Amino acid sequence: MRTRGASVRGVGAAAVVTTLLTLWSVPGLAQPDTHVGTWVLNVAKSKYNPGPPPKEQTTIMEAAGNGIKVTTKGVDAAGKPTGASYTANFDGKDSPVAGNPDWDMTSIKRVNANTLEFTRKKAGKVVQTATSVISSDGKTRTITSTGVDAQGRKINNVAVYDKK
């Protein structure tokens, strides 16, 4: 025969489990985005076709609403400073990009917890697609980009970044 106390404890345990599941599904309380952080280009592990690769590049990725804020600074092969920035949601809709000569709009879709797909446009036309993958240990970010650059040259780049 069940007692009233056992029944109350059962209902209480169910309420706790339901609350925890609800909190886990709230975006701000879910697992952190693996892309968020400071990423430094590992030029030795990267492949730029056509080259030359940048001398250095650092990308800071921050959570921003339902998407991500990206700020990139570096030095190109000729020694000139570079930089770009944008904030985009993971909804596949175009967002403006400042400072990048190759593309002025980007859209992002999340494939899974470690993978993002980008579509990059210049003057309304798709010029590049890219995939960003975070390694299983969270220490490496690899971006594979194909398309054309601002000079109209075909590109096939694999940029490898180390988490700082």
Image (cartoon, helix red, strand yellow):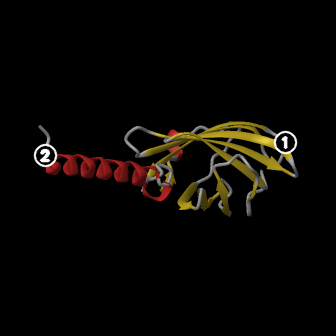
The residue closer to the viewer here, 159 or 19, is 19
How many marks do you count on the picture? Answer: 2
- Residue furthest to the front: 1
Where the N terminus falls, by quadrant? top left
| Image coordinates for residue 19, horizontal then vertical, percent | 36, 53
Mark number, residue 3: 2
| Label 1 residue SS | loop
Residue displayed at 84% across by 42% down: 152
Tell whether label 2 touches label 1 (CB within 8 Å).
Answer: no
Q: Nearer the viewer, residue 29 or 162?
A: 29
The structure residue drawn at horizontal position 42% and vertical position 51%, both measured from the top left corner, is: 22
Quarter of the image where the C terminus is located = bottom left
Residue at 71% over, 46% down: 92
Q: Residue type at mark 2?
A: Thr
Point out which mark residue 152 bears: 1
The type of residue carrying mark 1 is Gly
